[in-house]
Amino acid sequence: MSLDPALETVAPARPLVPAPLLILAAACLWGLLGIFGKGVQAAGVAPLEVAFWRALLGGALYALHALLTRSRLPRGRDLWITAGFGIAGVSVFYGSYQLAVKAGGASLASVLLYTAPAFVALLGWAFLRDRPGAREWVAIAGTLLGITFISLGGGQGVNVTLPALAFGLIAGFTYSLYYLYGKAFFHRYSTPALLGVALPVGALGLLPFVAPAGFAAKSAAAWGGLGGIAVLSTYLAYLLYSAGLRRLNATRASVIASVEPVVAAGLAALLFGERLAALALLGAALVIGAALLLSVEKKGPTRGR
């Protein structure tokens, strides 16, 4: 909480919630994303429709937030770039993640999402002339080895198929685009202003893939799951993370946030009987470890699942 300049002599109040707990809460909410998604899909809602409602409802919340706080919206060239990000970073990312949950399970999708930092290192090399060092190459190799172990290991209730791996890796790659986009825009505009534009555009990008088949009839439980995805795992999770990040360095935040796939895997095992085999667990540990190794030296992609 910032103080009025006239009250500089007064000691600042201690924050009500410690920053690490805010980051931990955000990670747990992100860990629910695949759980909510799998539950809604089991109720008869197609994966891409789940992604559509996440983008639409989450975007409405961000847009309302931006309106109430009178945040400056991107215009001109920035608006077009944000719209393009809405297609790649929302339509493709949200859609591929839900397809990965459908094809392979919630735990597998969550682990594969953690390939994003390796993609960030490669994208930085390709587009930002940020040449990877020894640490980056070790992490990239660890990520590839981890994916190999996951592919060979499998597990109970986990379908390690080519579509599951492909959708999971596409999700990881498109999530990594948040880093390139965020590096250019998140210091110039508020997050609600940017996502209040990008998410509705992403919903429009998904609409042609949902509308022809028609929208599924939804039970109260299905709507509850969609609400959980939009409010808890999209809007609230990022607000908690960004609030914690203001008082905690990015490295510590990334380490704490790595509890996300652990939460997802634990709940998937409890609720859906998903259990990775020993070799696949070793692969998951390598992928998460590689993400943590990269986070030590560089700030990971701005969170925006």
Image (cartoon, helix red, strand yellow):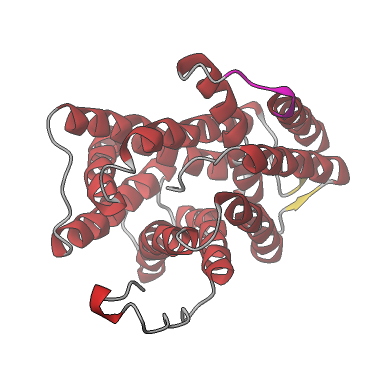
Left or right placement of residue 117 versus residue 205 in this view = right
- Asked if residue 26 is positioned above or below residue 148 in the image, the reply reads below
Residues in magenta, as a range: 131-135
Query: In terms of image quadrants, where is residue 94?
Result: top left
Which residue is rendered at x = 80% and y = 41% of the image?
280
Which residue is rendered at x = 41% and y = 69% of the image?
221
Which residue is rendered at x = 41% and y = 80% of the image?
12
280 and 62: which one is in front? 62
8 and 165: which one is in front? 8
136 and 275: which one is in front? 136
191 and 54: which one is in front? 191
- Asked if residue 63 is positioned above or below residue 2 in the image, the reply reads above
Please state the horizontal and vertical placement of residue 134, each as a whole percent of the image: 74, 23
Which residue is rendered at x = 70% and y = 45% of the image?
158
- Asked if residue 226 is positioned above or below residue 76 in the image, the reply reads below
Residue sitting farthest toward the right:
278
Please state the horizontal and vertical placement of residue 146, each as a whole percent of the image: 76, 33
Query: In terms of image quadrants, where is residue 273?
Result: bottom right
Secondary structure that dominates the magenta span: loop
Query: In terms of image quadrants, where is residue 200?
Result: top left
